[in-house]
Amino acid sequence: MRIPFLSRPSTPVVERRRQPRLRPHGDSYARIDGRDFALRNWSEDGLLIAPYVGALVPGQRATLAVVIRDWHDPDGTLCLENLAVTILRIDGLGMAVRFRGLERYKAAALREHYRRKSRSPKRGR
């Protein structure tokens, strides 16, 4: 006997993001209003901060600082201050933010750090 809804093949998950997200393997965090929140993943476009409990709401613009560092990492630490972001969503997964209007040197530093990390074969995504 075939059960019509359970016997259908599952649809493959299509990745629609422009860039794969990278998971930090260390003490990486975002500082918002003087409080540190752990980073779940990041890319050149934005961050996923989890868990987040605070006063920000989706659609709001904010500034934050981010520190991305991995344990025993030869690439070093990336520290960026006063990043302008837009809050995309806040849900059970955390708070998703997108960078907006980054200064040229900050965008270049973020892009270079992302390029080095995404090439590394041992990094999880």
Image (cartoon, helix red, strand yellow):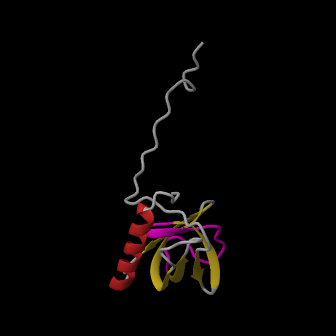
Of the pair 122 and 5, the residue shown nearer to us: 122
Number of marks in the image?
0
Residue 4 on image: x %, y %: 54, 21
Q: Is residue 51 magenta?
A: yes
x 58%, y 74%: residue: 28
Residue 106 vs residue 53: left or right?
A: left
**In terms of image quadrants, where is residue 55?**
bottom right
Whole-percent x and y of residue 27? 62, 74
Q: Residue furthest top?
A: 1
Residue 98: horizontal and vertical position, in percent? 45, 71
Horizontal relation, residue 19 to residue 53: left or right: left
Residue occupying the point 53% across, 72% down: 73
Up-down relation of residue 17 to residue 57 (above or below): above
What secondary structure prevails in the magenta region?
Answer: loop
In the image, residue 76 above or below residue 121: below
Which residue corresponds to the image point at 54% horizontal and 79% vertical from the top-left?
67
Asked if residue 54 lies left or right of residue 119, the reply is: right
Is residue 122 in view from this perspective? yes
Start-end of magenta stretch:
42-62
Residue 52: x %, y % from top left: 64, 71
Can see residue 103? no
Residue at 45% of width from left, 66% of height from top?
117
Q: Quadrant of the N terminus?
A: top right
